Amino acid sequence: MGFFDRFRKKKTHMNIEKAAQEILATAIYNVEEFLDSNLPDITERLHLNLGDFNNDYLRTELCFACVWTAVKVLSLGGDSSDLTDAIEEQFIGIIHGEERDNSTIALVYRFDRYTEAWDDDSKENQSIFCLNILSFMFNAGVIDANLKEFLGGVPILNLFILRTMSNVLTIRKQIKITD
């Protein structure tokens, strides 16, 4: 049975914590595939050497973006802040030790930047949002003179973000949150 198969037939009843766990798992489900398949193409387009970057750091940055995307698409769909807060708590909960405090601060900072960069009117073209993600992944969050080079990675990342949104919405439609 595939990951999504358990949700296909009828709504699955679960409490808010379990729903948050399932939605978070869905949001970050394709991160490894993206890193393996698309990251080499992005770094080539950006004229960067992939070997110069820590893969764990890139994975974490991409997960931040996926969590924000899940929270955003659910809030646009009218889900309560209880669910979106639970997703954020689940994500922070998987980080251990000293990194938890740093990750919480980083998550809040990125959420603010991503919220500012998101364009509700653009629908599927989230170029500025994607530029911000790439800037965190490859340029310490700075969008500077390298902006033109970063544009080369936007279409690939934009498709990944859209796929993440679609997956989150698909799974959410199949979940009935119970007390």
Image (tube, rainbow, N blue to C red):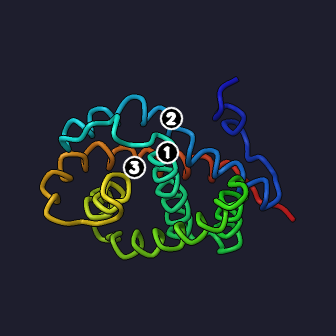
Quadrant of the frame with the C terminus: bottom right
Q: What residue does disc 1 label?
A: 59
> Given this view, does label 1 or label 2 mark the residue nearer the observer?
1
Q: Could you tell me which quadrant the N terminus lies in?
A: top right
Q: Residue 162 got which mark?
A: 3
**Residue at image location 44% in from the left, 42% down from the top:** 54
Task: Point out the tag, 2 or 3, that comes first from the N-terminus.
Answer: 2
Residue drawn at the location 51% of the way across and 62% of the way down: 68
Task: Between label 2 and label 3, give the one nearer the viewer.
Answer: 2
Q: Is residue 37 left or right of residue 59?
A: left
Residue 13: x %, y % from top left: 81, 51
* Label 3 element class: helix
Q: Quadrant of residue 37?
A: top left
Label 1 Cα crowd, 10 Å radius (few <14 / some 14-19 / many 20+) = some
Q: Nearer the viewer, mark 3 or mark 1?
A: 1
Q: Secondary structure at mark 1?
A: helix
- Residue 151, above or below 121: above
Q: Amino acid at mark 3?
A: Leu
Q: Which amino acid does the dot numbered 1 rest on?
A: Arg
Binning the other alpha carbons within 10 Å of mark 3 as few (below 14), some (14 to 19) or many (20 upward) gives: some
Task: State the SS at label 2.
Answer: helix
Kindly identify the amino acid type of the residue bearing the numbered disc 2: Glu
Give coordinates of residue 20: x percent, y percent: 71, 57
Q: Characterize the local packing of mark 2: few (<14), some (14-19) or many (20 or more) Cα atoms within 10 angstroms.
A: some
Residue highlighted by disc 2 = 32
**Against 50, is 82 above or below?**
below
Q: Quadrant of residue 103?
A: bottom right
Marks 1/2 in contact by CB < 8 Å: the verdict is: yes
First along the sequence among labels 3 and 1: 1
* Real-space CA distance between mark 2 and mark 3, rounded to the nearest whole angstrom: 16 Å
The total number of labels drawn is: 3
Answer whether labels 3 and 1 touch (C-beta < 8 Å). no
